[in-house]
Image (tube, helix red, strand yellow):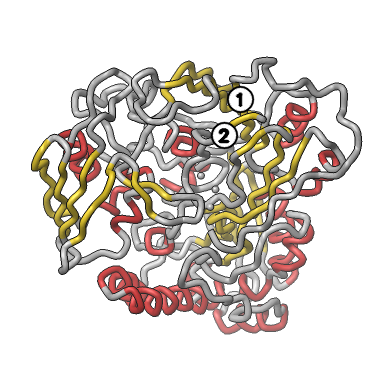
Amino acid sequence: MNGFVRTASITLVTALGLAACTAGDTVTDPSRTATASGDPATLSVGFTAEPATLDFTTSDGAAIPQALLTNVYEGLVKLDPEGRISPGLATDWQISPDRKTYTFTLRPDARFSSGEPFTAADAVYSIQRVKSSWTTSVKSAMDKVSSVRATSPTQLTVKLSEPSNDWLYRMTTRVGAMFSRTGTGKLATATNGTGPYMLGTWNRGDSLVLKRNPYYTGTAPYFSTVTFKYFKDGTALNNALLTGSIDIISNVQAPESLAQFQGRRDLKIIEGTTTAEVLLAMNNKKGPFASEKVRQAARSAIDKRTLLDTCWAGKGTLIGSMVPPTDPWYQDLTGIWPYDQARARALLAQAGTPNPAIRLRLPNLAYATSCGQVVKANLEAVGFKVTLDQLEFPAAWLTQVFTDREYDATIVAHVEPRDMGRVFSPAYYIGYNNPQFQQLIAAADTGTAAEEITSRRAAARLLSETAASDFLFLMPSIMVAGSGIEGLATNAISESFDVTGLSRS
């Protein structure tokens, strides 16, 4: 979770891209240095949420794959900037006519940062380990794998128990990361991947430094060293860019702060979209929100347009569902539960709870705390009695809300792509248990391409109609960078903040 829940979800790239824009035409502020470090071969990127561990096989935190996926750990396949599945450690792959057997041809020259060669045996180990040893909710992506074997050092055959439209896509995410079979005992504090970078140093509470992997056989990245710098709040993050301490703000935490970056020739603002749905997540399993009518009342009570204007400066997209516009099955469902206070009161009366008391537990992140005040006011206006508290993110929030489910509602951005089925599975922290929804998700995965779209649209509509949670808005991607930084993606649709293709002009 990176200040966001990488759904597991619970980390931000296709259509709907907003053009990158470079701020205006005033003189460069002399307080900003030419580069953050004075060395053009180094790069520093600012974030507000850091990893609690480096092991994304045991932690659902989005900040881990954000820093390590693609940069340090590679998969057989990856997403290109347009969201298409493209070669990674596999140069190509074949799919059998029954859509159950995948044959991958692997790069013959790939090596881990330890110097060991990457082979099909490592791929077998990595896939099997997801099923046997991973403890995060994303591991379910590998459930459909019935067998995996190396037919040569550079050829891998994976058989699924049934056709899956989703499986190859999941292999572009953290669940498809390849590890060395000779040892994964120190993943929490050390790395050994095949990517262009390897771990340099990790200063907890401050920074994560990546350095070039000397055994990487692809095109060497432009920057020899990349520092992921972590800040406690958005103001400190912004000041770091203004004073030249960092080169990039990965995602602006308060859009109203953009004014201080505009009109500077040494900086550029890049606006796009993400896969991060900001939810008012409601506990469907216990408490007031176990009632569908109470959940529907909450959805009707919240003025999403005003909320977006108030707490996120109008940036972002109202979607009404768990599907971003970059997915093929997107549909605008904002009209299902429009803002209607009278309807909200009527629904509470029908539920027999005109004044339900709820505990709204927020992660101490800028978007959650600012939006939380608006949500609290909206809910109280129709009769809810709201107790609001804040939890340190990620540790306290993950323990008390995500794991222990000690909450009635929370606000969090689920950033993992195509996460609707997992987030609203019965075992997930929201506790939504709807057999019809699960049937639609299963049909979408095994059906034809057209059937997938039809079923996923129906599933998204069902979530919205039953008010499984409230879909407040889709988080925008707003980066600010030195004007000489090249290669930044406009949209953020991958789990990784990919620095491998960045350069400085």
**Quadrant containing the C terminus in the rendered view:** top right
Left or right of 2 on screen, residue 285: left
Inspect the image, locate mark 1, and give the three-letter code of the amino acid beneath it. Answer: Leu
- In the rendered image, residue 497, in percent from the top left (x then y), is placed at 52, 39
- In the rendered image, residue 420, in percent from the top left (x then y), is placed at 43, 63
Please tell me whether mark 2 or mark 1 is closer to you in this view.
2
In 3D space, how far apart are the residues under numbered discs 2 and 1 (Cα atoms)?
A: 9 Å
Residue 370, numbered circle: none
Near-viewer residue (282 or 442): 442
Which residue position holds label 1?
Answer: 43
Farthest left residue in view = 151
Near-viewer residue (89 or 367): 89
In percent of the image, x 63 and y 37: which residue is there?
486
Left or right of 78 on screen, residue 67: right
Which residue position holds label 2?
Answer: 502
Q: Secondary structure at mark 1?
A: strand
Mark 1 or mark 2, which is nearer the start of the sequence? 1
When asked about the image quadrant of residue 279, the answer is bottom right
Inspect the image, locate mark 2, and give the three-letter code of the amino acid beneath it. Answer: Leu
When asked about the image quadrant of residue 337, the answer is bottom right
Q: How many C-alpha atoms fall within 10 Å of the one at disc 1: few (<14), some, or many (≥20)?
A: many
When asked about the image quadrant of residue 333, the answer is bottom right
In percent of the image, x 50 and y 43: which residue is there?
1
Q: Examine the rendered structure and indicate whether residue 341 appears above or below residue 503.
A: below
Left or right of 351 on screen, residue 160: left
Q: How many C-alpha atoms fall within 10 Å of the one at disc 2: few (<14), some, or many (≥20)?
A: some
Whether label 2 touches label 1, CB < 8 Å: yes
Say whether residue 37 is visible: yes
- In the rendered image, residue 315, in percent from the top left (x then y), is placed at 72, 57
Say whether residue 405 is visible: no
